Structure formats: structure tokens, C-alpha cells
Image (tube, rainbow, N blue to C red):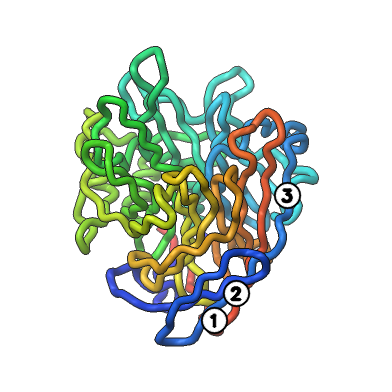
């Protein structure tokens, strides 16, 4: 994966505001906004199934993906990772063609070793990942051969019941392309404490490398288990790669590795106290609060070089009981425009933006796909991995690709 430190790549994520326009067509809900530049238009095509439930089962992926997807092109091969529901862990497939996942996917990684041990070991009693550990988003550093993985961890409570769960985000790394993972520890926790009947799903996280930093997009929740909203935190890429190179698990200080965005700056710790993860993390500012797509979750963010803007895909509408998949765009990765529904499916979940036209699968252009699962969560019966093609117009000529920088 390419690091975007070169100034000709994606712009630094900051707090400037902007205006834009979207025109959505082809059988989906249109949204019209004003623009101080030139209008962009998104055209959404017909739904395509790329992996059926039967194909998933044949490939040993019977309860996969249980998260958004993480993709990386390494030496001409696409590595695609996601969480597995049960037995939980991170599973991966390799393919030369992201457009044909259902044909003959090969397993790059397994949730269990042959002797039955998990790839990402669960944390000890009380840990953020005591009951569940698995995820999708990855970043490959060619200079060291290290694959960084942000994963989703869960603690189920009250003890012995599993009626409620409290999730956080951790980091793991691999030196053999995902065959085995080594945990570094927790890096982001919701602001609210683990208490009462509070259930909070932070999602799987999305690592976006920009200007020497990883920007992690996830879902946070405020004090008292209220005010759910999309959030972003960041950590320097060099610090993360450095931690993986030493292989030392986080025991102290790592709560400050990722800083949450709050009131105009990245100033709040990802985890307040690593020794007591039940206390939660620092404060956050919700990136958008529109009630038209209430309770937005599982944000998946990519940079589009054709638009020269960021695109966020996410699940919206849970507050109303009628959900769908939405897009928003942003010039700076902090301030986001109005929502546009692109998939009107109450059972669609885990949206992932992918480029399947060659090159970096995370680098969007004038054409890309939105992948998702439906009907969620029917893993064992008829849940498919589907996608819709999206074509963009009204953008600009893509800038030169940034020079890769490794740590």
C-alpha cells in the first residue's frame, strides 16, 4: 500500500469547511446540493452478487465477512481480510481479480490453526477483546514486510450471559501476510464507560494513511451511553510501524498512540487507562449528526483522486428501524456533506468501498464499487456478498501518484 506523504497525493485531514454538490441517478434516491466549484454526480448501477452463501461455505468462509473488508495489493495479489463470526477471528482470501471472488478464493489466513488455536488470541478476563477478536482493515509496509491490522474486540456482560457487549479497537501485525497475527493491544475505546446495559459497537475501523498519519474512522458513544456518532482518531504511521517492529505488546502509554478528534484538534486519548479498559476513552466530536440517517455506524472511508475528496460509506437509519447504505463526501476528512442513500436495503450491512480496476484497491477514481453483505445477519443460510457499481462525473484529472514512503 502506498503512503501518501507526498504533497501531490490526498490532502492533509484538517478542519476547513466546504460546499459541494451530488446528483445521484439510476434508480436511487437523488440529492441536490449547491456547489461553489463544479457539480459532481454519482451514478449507481444494478446490484451484483460476487459471493453467494454456497460459495462462502465451499471456500471455508461460512460466517464471513462479519465486518467491513480490508484489502491490500501485495506483489500482484489482492489480500482481502474480514472478521469471521464464529469461531471468531480474522479470515483472509487471496485473488488476482477482485471482480471474481466467488469463483475460486484461496485462504490467506484462518481464524484457527489446525490444532484449533485462534489467530488473534482473546484477551484475559476483563480485556476489551476477551470474547471476540477479528476485523478487516489492513495496511502493508513493503519496506519491512509488516502487515498492520486494526481489529474489533468485544467484552460481553453481565458475566456468563452475553446480553450486552462493549467493543473497542486494537492493533495486531503479521510478518507472513496474515497467516498468523501478533497482538499489540487496545488503541481506541468508546468515550462511555462499560457499565449498566450499555451496548456500543465501534465497528471495524478504517485506516486511511495521509501525511504521515493513520486516520482511523469508527463509531463512538458519549458519556452515559448516549450520543452515538461517527468519529476519527489518528496516530503517526512511524509510531505504529515502530511498535510492530519491536513486537512489544502495549502495556502503558499506548492509550495515547491514537488521539481522538475533539473540538477542532486531535487531543483526546484513544484509551483513558489501558489497565482498566472498562473506563472508556477520551472525548470525541461526531463528524456528522444528521437525524435523516440516525445512528450511523460502520463508516468506511477512502480518498477519491478523481474528485480530490474523501468518500464515506456507512450504515444509516438504525434509529428509525429502516436502515440503508449512505455516502457522504468531504474535502478535508473532517467536515462532511449531506447524506445520500445509495442502497435501499434494510438488511444491508458492512459497506466497503473498493477499486477493482487494478492497482491499489483502496484508491478510488471515477469508477469503483460499494461492497456489502445482505441479508444480514443470516450467515448460515442465504447471506450474500453483494456490490453496486458507482460512476463519478464532474471530477478533475487525477494528480500523479504519490511516492511510496516506508518506515
Left or right: where 237 falls relative to 314: left
* Number of the label disc, if any, that sits on residue 305: none
Which of 85 and 48 lies nearest the eye of the viewer?
Answer: 48
Mark 1 nearby-residue class (10 Å; few <14, some 14–19, many ≥20): some
Q: Which of the marked residues, 2 or 3, is nearer the chain's N terminus?
A: 3
Q: Which residue is mark 1?
A: 395
Q: Is the residue marked by circle 3 packed among few (<14), some (14-19), or many (20+) residues within 10 Å?
A: some
Give the image location of residue 396, x and y in percent: 53, 84
Name the quadrant of the C terminus: bottom left
Compared to 276, does 173 lie above or below? below
Distance Cα–Cα, label 1 vs label 2: 7 Å
Please tell me in which quadrant of the rendered image residue 236 appears: bottom left
User: Is residue 184 visible to the viewer in this orientation of the structure?
Assistant: no
Give the side of residue 307 with respect to residue 226, left or right: right
Q: Residue at x 24, y 33 (%)?
A: 193
Horizontal side of residue 144 vs 231, given as left or right: right
Amino acid at each position: 500500500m502506498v503512503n501518501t506523504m507526498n504533497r501531490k497525493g490526498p490532502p492533509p485531514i484538517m478542519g476547513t469547511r466546504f460546499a459541494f454538490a451530488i446528483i445521484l441517478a439510476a434508480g436511487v434516491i437523488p440529492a441536490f446540493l449547491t456547489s461553489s466549484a463544479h457539480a459532481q454526480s454519482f451514478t449507481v448501477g444494478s446490484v451484483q452478487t460476487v459471493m453467494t452463501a454456497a460459495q462462502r461455505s465451499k471456500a471455508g468462509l461460512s460466517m464471513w465477512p462479519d465486518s467491513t473488508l480490508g484489502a491490500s495489493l501485495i506483489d500482484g495479489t489482492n489480500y482481502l481480510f474480514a472478521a469471521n463470526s464464529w469461531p471468531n477471528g480474522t479470515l483472509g482470501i487471496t485473488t488476482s481479480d477482485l471482480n471474481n471472488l466467488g469463483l475460486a478464493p484461496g485462504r490467506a489466513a484462518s481464524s484457527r490453526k489446525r490444532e484449533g488455536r485462534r489467530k488473534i488470541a482473546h484477551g484475559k478476563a476483563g480485556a476489551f477483546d476477551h470474547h471476540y477478536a477479528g476485523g478487516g482493515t489492513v495496511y502493508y509496509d513493503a519496506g519491512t514486510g509488516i502487515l498492520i491490522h486494526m481489529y474489533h474486540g468485544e467484552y460481553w456482560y453481565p458475566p456468563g450471559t452475553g446480553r450486552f457487549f462493549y467493543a473497542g479497537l486494537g492493533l495486531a501485525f503479521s510478518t507472513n501476510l496474515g497467516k498468523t497475527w501478533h497482538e499489540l493491544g487496545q488503541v481506541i475505546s468508546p468515550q462511555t464507560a462499560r457499565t449498566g446495559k450499555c451496548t456500543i459497537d465501534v465497528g471495524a475501523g478504517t485506516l486511511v494513511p495521509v501525511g504521515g498519519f493513520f486516520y482511523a474512522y469508527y463509531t463512538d458513544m458519549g458519556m452515559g451511553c448516549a450520543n452515538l456518532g461517527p468519529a476519527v482518531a489518528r496516530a503517526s504511521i512511524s509510531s505504529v510501524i515502530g511498535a510492530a517492529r519491536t513486537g512489544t505488546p502495549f502495556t502503558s502509554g499506548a492509550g495515547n498512540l491514537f488521539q481522538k478528534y475533539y473540538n477542532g484538534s486531535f487531543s483526546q486519548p484513544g484509551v483513558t487507562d489501558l489497565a482498566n479498559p472498562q473506563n472508556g476513552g477520551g472525548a470525541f466530536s461526531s463528524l456528522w449528526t444528521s437525524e435523516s440517517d440516525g445512528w450511523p455506524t460502520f463508516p468506511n472511508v477512502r480518498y477519491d483522486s478523481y474528485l480530490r475528496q474523501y468518500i464515506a460509506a456507512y450504515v444509516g437509519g438504525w434509529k428509525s428501524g429502516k436502515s440503508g447504505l449512505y455516502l457522504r463526501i468531504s474535502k478535508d476528512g473532517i467536515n462532511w456533506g449531506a447524506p445520500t442513500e445509495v442502497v435501499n436495503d434494510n438488511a444491508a450491512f458492512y459497506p466497503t468501498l473498493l477499486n477493482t480496476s487494478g492497482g491499489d484497491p483502496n484508491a478510488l477514481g471515477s469508477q469503483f464499487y460499494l461492497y456489502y453483505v445482505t441479508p444480514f445477519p443470516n450467515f448460515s443460510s442465504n447471506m450474500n456478498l453483494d456490490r453496486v457499481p458507482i460512476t463519478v462525473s464532474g471530477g478533475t484529472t487525477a494528480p500523479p501518484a504519490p511516492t511510496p514512503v516506508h518506515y
